[in-house]
Amino acid sequence: MTRKLLILLALLSFLAGCNTISSLVHDDQVVAKVGKYRLYRSQLSAFLPDGISPEDSVNLSERYIRSWATELLYLKMAEEQLSKGELDVTPELEDYRRSLLKFRYEQRYINDRLDTLITQAQLESYYKEHQASFELERPILKVRYVDILRDAPAREEILDRLSATDPASRRLLDSLSFSAALRYFDSSDRWMDAAVLAREFGTDYVSMLSGLKDGRIERSSEERSDVRVMQVFDIRRSGIAPIEYCAESIRDNILSQRKRDLLEKLEQDLLTDALDRKKFVIY
């Protein structure tokens, strides 16, 4: 056990009156002090996550105590050495208060009025009007992937069925893979980014795609006891992404525009109402 661990364990044991860090939660004795400020056990225990080891608890406790003390020592130094004008943070606090309240009201206003329903027709209209925004940066693929041990009893059957398209074979493949494979997923009807898929092979997407042969990418090595295989059902290397691949980002864009429109309307309504009621006057 390290010297640091022994010292901090002894400190915590002394403060708690027992040998366990969990005793920190039972009362509010002082754990550390900086000037007039005190750090209590309840504050420290609230910072510590459940289920961690005693050594991790000690390390986190020491880190929290040092961070707490550093903040207060900075504060003490600032109060001693800054001028009266520099110590006055009232304008900054007022600016922050205004910004925070404005933000909270905007969120309330948007939540009460935002129409979150987006029809398929609206998706298609947005897609057609913003084609240039959906130019593919990388290839996208529809695949089925499995990572399985070489000596897995169902390995050959799983690999043989990896290209299956009929429902019965797919169900059997799913059942076998979920029970026998290290990792398995079926994205044969959903586009995926090549860069995301390349992580399964621990490489970049260019290297991954260079291994594509007869609709399949396979990686194995002497150092590993598993085989990683990706069955490719479709691939688009360039051009405009299909609408189903863009649908989620289109929804986000439409909702973002609706939020901006609501906030612009709110701002205009506030100004118009204030002018009409003579609460806002321009000289």
Image: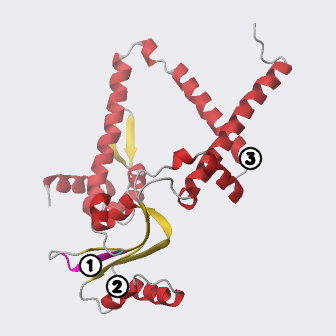
Instruction: Examine the rendering and report whether any part of residue 107 can be seen.
Output: no
Please tell me whether mark 3 sits on a helix, a strand or a loop. helix
Quadrant of image for the C terminus? top right
Task: Residue type at mark 1: give it.
Answer: Val
Marks 1/2: CA–CA distance: 10 Å
Marks 3/2: CA–CA distance: 52 Å
In the rendered image, which residue does mark 3 sit on? 112
Q: Would you say residue 206 sits in the magenta stretch?
A: no
Mark 3 Cα shell of 10 Å, populated few (<14), some (14-19), many (≥20): few
In front: 226, or 207? 207
Asked if marks 1 and 2 touch (Cβ < 8 Å), the reply is yes
Quadrant of image for the N terminus? bottom left
Please tell me whether mark 2 sits on a helix, a strand or a loop. helix
In front: 174, or 46? 174
Q: Residue at x 23, y 53 (%)?
A: 8
Q: Main secondary structure of the magenta part?
A: strand
Mark 1 or 3: in front is 1
Q: Which mark is residue 33?
A: none
Direction from residue 122 to residue 244 in the image, left or right: left
Q: Which mark is residue 159?
A: 2
Q: Could you tell me residue 163's position as x and y percent? A: 41, 81
Q: Is residue 206 above or below residue 174?
A: above
Q: Is residue 42 above or below residue 23?
A: above
Please tell me whether mark 1 sits on a helix, a strand or a loop. strand
Dot placed on the residue nearer the N-terminal end, 1 or 3? 3
Task: Residue type at mark 2: give it.
Answer: Leu
In the rendered image, which residue does mark 1 sit on? 227
